[in-house]
Image: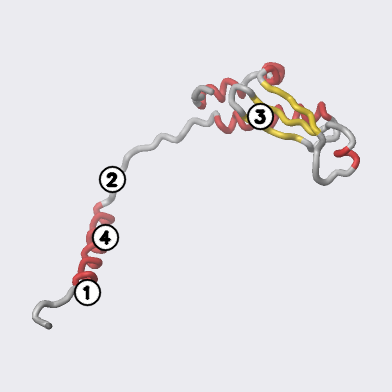
Amino acid sequence: MSFLTHRDYARMAALPASELAKDCTFEAFHGHGPGGQGVNTADSAVRTTHVPTGIVVVSRESRSQYRNRQLCLQKIRDELRRRSVPPAVRRATKPTKGSQLRRLESKHARSQTKALRRRVFGDE
């Protein structure tokens, strides 16, 4: 799988549902958990994999396999939109003069504490 940028994800998120579905594999299975007969009697849960990105989503909200497929496509589109946000630009900053002074003062205080632990010569 090649490296994808936020622009690639944005382009994929803008595709119509039919085009997005062409890039996906769908797998129906028995849902598990609460729901009783509606979940256990039919392969209504759907696992969808978006092949170009490797995004995998599962939907078992509805008793309809068709509706669960639509929900999976919506979840994939939401994830593509989330990944399409460009990263924030980071700018290097310098520490303020006050923070530099505080740091040096704390280093000096620590040095004094350690100096007091040393053995004094001539006390033998």
In the displayed structure, would residue 15 be above or below residue 114?
above
Q: Which residue is mark 4?
A: 102
The type of residue carrying mark 4 is Arg
Q: From the viewer's perspective, is residue 16 above or below residue 114?
A: above
Label 1 and label 4: CA atoms lie apart by 23 Å
CA distance for labels 4 and 2 = 15 Å
Which residue position holds label 1? 117
* Image spot of residue 62 (x, y percent): 82, 35
Can you tell which of label 1 and label 3 is closer to the viewer? 1
The residue to which callout 3 is attached is 76
- Left or right: residue 99 compared with residue 6: left
Q: Is residue 102 above or below residue 16?
A: below
Give the left or right position of residue 87, taking residue 47 as reference: left
First of labels 1, 4 by sequence position = 4
Please rate how many residues cluster around mark 1, counting C-alpha atoms within 10 Å: few if below 14, some from 14 to 19, many from 20.
Answer: few
Q: How is the image coloured?
A: secondary structure
Task: Please name the residue shown 84% across and 31% down the image.
Answer: 43
Residue at the image point whose x is 28% and y is 49% from the top: 95
Q: On the picture, is 17 further left or further right than 95?
A: right
Give residue 76's quadrant in the image.
top right
> Observer-nearest residue: 2 or 98?
2
CA distance for labels 4 and 3: 49 Å
As measured in the structure, the alpha-carbon distance from the residue carrying label 1 to the one carrying label 3 is 62 Å
Q: Are marks 1 and 4 in contact (CB under 8 Å)?
A: no
In this figure, which residue is indicated by the disc labeled 2? 94
Q: Earlier in the sequence, mark 3 or mark 2?
A: 3
Amino acid residing under circle 1: Arg
- Labels 3 and 2 touching (C-beta < 8 A): no
Along the polypeptide, which appears first: circle 2 or circle 1?
A: 2
